[in-house]
Amino acid sequence: MKADIHPQYGPVVFNDLASGEKILTRSTATSDKTIEWEDGNTYPVIDVEISAASHPFYTGKQRIMDTAGRVERFNARFKGFGGKK
């Protein structure tokens, strides 16, 4: 690798704002905000809106939508659209 062209790769804490879970990992992302981790060290923290800890796909807590009513309304609204003239 060429020297001095790659971003610094180091420990970063990602804070999931939806669930409150914090994950210590390594990344090239940086932040001015810091947090003291469980090991006593201070790391940069990056706030994220959603992660695997709070996303419905990963948690299995998906909202069930009223698809039958929505489909019926759609079909009623566009029943004559695109038909032969």
Image (tube, rainbow, N blue to C red):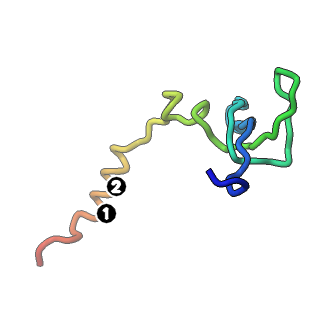
- 66, above or below 84, in the image: above
Q: Is residue 26 left or right of residue 36?
A: left
Residue 23: image tag: none
Q: Nearer the viewer, residue 25 or 68?
A: 25
Amino acid under disc 1: Arg
Element carrying mark 1: helix
- 85, above or below 49, in the image: below
On the image, numbered disc 2 is attached to which residue? 73
On the image, numbered disc 1 is attached to which residue? 77
Indicate the quadrant containing the C terminus: top left, top right, bottom left or bottom right.
Answer: bottom left
Q: Nearer the viewer, residue 31 or 80?
A: 31
- Image coordinates of residue 68 in percent, x first then y, are 33, 44
Residue contact between numbered discs 2 and 1, judged by CB atoms under 8 Å: yes
Q: Quadrant of residue 47?
A: top right
- 73, above or below 52, in the image: below
Q: CA distance from mark 2 to mark 1?
A: 6 Å
- Image coordinates of residue 65 in percent, x first then y, are 44, 41
Q: Is residue 38 left or right of residue 55?
A: right
Question: Which residue of the protein is positioned furthest toward the bottom in this rendering?
Answer: 85
Q: Quadrant of residue 44?
A: top right
- Image coordinates of residue 30 in percent, x first then y, are 76, 47
Instruction: Give me the residue at 86% from left, 39% from top.
Output: 34
Q: Nearer the viewer, residue 38 or 16?
A: 38
Amino acid under disc 2: Arg
Question: Which residue of the protein is positioned furthest toward the left in this rendering?
Answer: 84
- Image coordinates of residue 75 in percent, x first then y, are 27, 57
Element carrying mark 2: helix
Q: Within 10 angstroms of label 1, few (less than 14), some, or many (20 or more) residues? A: few
Instruction: Give me the residue at 74% from left, 35% from top.
Output: 11
